[in-house]
Amino acid sequence: MKIASARHILVADEASCEKLRQDIESGADFAVVARNHSLCPSGAEGGDLGSFRPGEMVAEFDAVVFSAEVGKLQGPVKTDFGYHLIEVTSRS
């Protein structure tokens, strides 16, 4: 059974998501950006979502988490919740 760990930042619009992606790619700390900008309660934990299995997250989120390169920033990923930046921290 696959299991993954990830962290994310959730914002309301794609433009904000792109701006935060640029900030992180320019050296901003993911966890600090998550604490300051994420609309998800996980933002308080630096965006950390812990570990989960396929099917525990919405489909669009799952598709990225269970296929993307570990440690590489992904997004914007649109879901019903908004726009996400996602970093897979581990997967087995």
Image (cartoon, grey):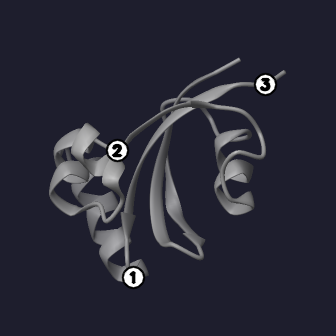
Q: Provide residue 14's location: percent of width, then percent of height.
A: 42, 79
| Residue highlighted by disc 3 | 2
Q: Residue at x 27, y 63 (%)?
A: 20
- Residue 54 is left or right of residue 18, and the answer is right
Q: Residue at x 72, y 33 (%)?
A: 53
Give the number of the mark in front: 3 or 1: 3
Give, as a three-letter code, the residue at label 2.
Gly
Q: Residue at x 62, y 34 (%)?
A: 69
Badge 2 is on which residue? 47
Specify the amino acid type for callout 1.
Answer: Asp
Q: Secondary structure at mark 3?
A: loop
The Cα–Cα distance between marks 3 and 1, rounded to whole angstroms, is 31 Å
As drawn, the residue found furthest toward the right would be 1
| Residue under the point 22% across and 57% down | 23
Q: Do we see residue 29 in this rendering?
A: no
Residue 70 shown left or right of residue 38 in the figure: right
How packed is label 3: few (under 14 Cα within 10 Å), some, or many (20 or more)?
Answer: few
Q: Position of residue 67 (x, y in %)?
A: 73, 40
- Above or below, 69 against 14 in this view is above
Image quadrant in which you'd find residue 41: bottom left
The residue most toward the top is: 92
> Which residue is tagged 1?
13
Circle 2: is it few (<14), some (14-19), or many (20+) Cα within 10 Å? Answer: many
Q: Earlier in the sequence, mark 1 or mark 2?
A: 1
The answer to which of marks 3 and 1 sits earlier in the sequence is: 3
Residue 22: x and y, percent? 29, 60
First along the sequence among labels 3 and 2: 3
Name the foreground residue: 20 vs 63. Answer: 63
- SS under mark 1: loop
Instruction: Give the amino acid at mark 3.
Output: Lys
The Cα–Cα distance between marks 3 and 2, rounded to whole angstroms, is 21 Å
